[in-house]
Amino acid sequence: MSKFNESYIITMKDIVREGDPILRQQTEEVTLPPTNEELETLKCMLQFLKNSQDPELAAKYKLRSGVGLSANQIGLNKRMFAAYFHDEKGNLHEYGLINPKIISHSISMIYITNGEGCLSVDRDVPGYVPRYERIKVKAIDITGKEVTIKLSGFGAIVAQHEIDHLNGIMFYDHINQENPFKLPENVEIKSVF
Ligand SMILES: [Zn+2]
């Protein structure tokens, strides 16, 4: 039994940091239908993100603010992630996704001017992280039903960051090694903010 049930409060001590091999491995597909335990774990992960963005709760539990969390970031070898954020248009997004798969993406790309951060990385890594501007993701949602979600802009960045985690990829793997602020050539690319 995983300890991450609905009443468990995830704190920073539960977050796996870089250097741990679980962040570098391809995680395993969740057998469908997901168990109640897996759905509860997802709710628990989602609650952590909400708590981390609530100034009072973040101070109380000493949480670093986060918009996405993958299961291997809490030590679970399962293809699932939670995300909770406002996009650049101010719309609130809330996802708990199982076995997410990018089924199509734009050619055009985007990046965040300030680069990306990660709850598993306790240091600043400067540089641009190019991501697809739009993606379509197929997954099982937190209620257990199959969904296809279209994401663009910041939302697409968050989902690509989390799906990368499930494939053992860290955000800085995408940063140009010679010049961290060099953008890919021959492709349309712009900043989100
Ligand atoms: Zn991350």
Image (spheres, grey):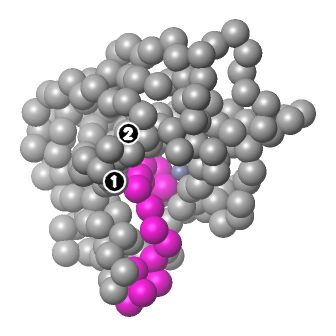
Determine whether, in the image, residue 24 is placed left or right of residue 53.
right
Q: Which residue is mark 2?
A: 155
Image side of residue 141 versus residue 14, left or right:
left
* Label 2 SS: helix
* Magenta-span inclusion, residue 147: no
Which residue is depicted at the point 42% across and 34% down?
153
The residue under label 2 is which amino acid type? Gly
Q: Residue at x 42, y 87 (%)?
A: 59
Task: Assign a secondary structure to mark 1.
Answer: strand
Task: Name the residue carrying label 1.
Answer: 85
Q: Which mark is residue 128?
A: none
Alpha carbon of mark 2 to alpha carbon of mark 1: how far? 8 Å
Image quadrant of residue 66?
A: bottom left
Residue 28's spot in the image, x, y percent?
A: 41, 35
Tell me the quarter of the image containing the N terminus: bottom left
Determine crowd level at label 2: few under 14, some 14-19, many 20+ residues with C-alpha closer than 10 A.
many
Q: Which residues are magenta?
A: 58-73
Q: Residue furthest bottom?
A: 60
Mark closest to the chain's N terminus, 2 or 1: 1
- Name the one closer to the observer, 81 or 175: 175
Position in image of residue 150 (x %, y %): 28, 26
Looking at the image, residue 175 lies above or below residue 142: above
Q: Residue at x 32, y 21 (%)?
A: 136
Nearest the viewer among 177 and 21 is 177
Q: Is residue 59 magenta?
A: yes
Q: Where in the figure is residue 172, as x and y percent of width and height?
A: 69, 42
Q: Is residue 57 above or below residue 78?
A: below
Q: Residue 25 is drawn in which quadrant?
A: top right
Residue 94: horizontal and vertical position, in percent?
24, 50
- How many other residues sit within 10 Å of disc 1, few (<14), some (14-19) or many (≥20)? many
User: What amino acid type is highlighted by mark number 1?
Assistant: Phe
Is there a contact, CB below 8 Å, between mark 2 and mark 1?
yes
